[in-house]
Amino acid sequence: MPNFKSLIFGSEQEAWEGKRESENVIIGYDYKRFSKPPIIGKNPLIRANSIIYNDVTIGDNLMTGHNVLIREKTTLGHDVLIGTNTVIEGHTKIGNNVSIQSNVYIPKKSFIEDNVFIGPCACFTNDRYPVRVDYRLKGPIIRKGASIGANSTFLSNIEVGEGAIVAAGAVVTHAVPPWYLAIGAPAKIKPLPPKLKVSNNI
């Protein structure tokens, strides 16, 4: 169980109470009866107006921007960055050393492996036929070392392979094989240039 008094602002009780109100951070949003407070590792930096629900597990060195929402049944690894205005809808697993930039939407039932970069305003979905058909929700599967470009959009249940790159603005309707490039709208799958077949340097 983390020491909530020192999570963000230090260990002084008086300073904590004043800053807690002004920063408007909620750690442990009680969304249902018998939900359990989040478990948060060492050295977190959680910025103003962020909300972390109960039943969340987070590793060491979490860093958020402002106005971040992390909903229930989410697991984050170590060294995860979550940018300003990003929403993680819950029932999601995110690995270690993941960089998620600002204004990203991650729906329920998403799975993101280690060393992944997700650019600003990327939008993933989990419902292929919204409000029309009873569809089993399936978010994206992003394999280790993949890079997702800014303003890219994904249909539900899309897998992006290890080391693959999705270009900025792409609309991804099919799986992206490992170490391939998805570019355009709808995205076309092309071989990744040799100079880009390297690991992410996050």
Image: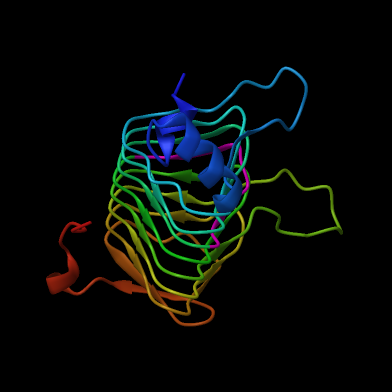
Q: Residue furthest front?
A: 14
Image coordinates of residue 74 in percent, x first then y, are: 54, 36
* Residue at the image point whose x is 58% and y is 24% from the top: 37
Magenta residue check for 4: no
Find out whether residue 90 is within the magenta segment: yes
144, 201: nearer the viewer: 201
The residue at the point 83 percent across, 47 percent down is 134
What is the magenta range? 85-95
State the image coordinates of residue 144 (x, y, percent, origin top left).
31, 47
Q: Give the x, y percent position of residue 47.
A: 47, 52
Residue 144 appears in view: yes
Quadrant (top left, top right, bottom left, bottom right) of the C terminus: bottom left
Q: Is residue 31 above or below residue 71?
A: above
- What is the x, y in percent for residue 127? 71, 55
Using the image as rendered, state which of residue 28 and residue 196 is in the foreground: 28
User: Does residue 139 appear anywhere in the picture?
Assistant: no
Q: Residue at x 45, y 70 (%)?
A: 120
- Of 7 and 16, which appears nearest the observer? 16
Tally of numbered discs: 0
Answer with left or right where residue 144 lies relative to residue 106: left
- Above/below status of 113 relative to 13: below
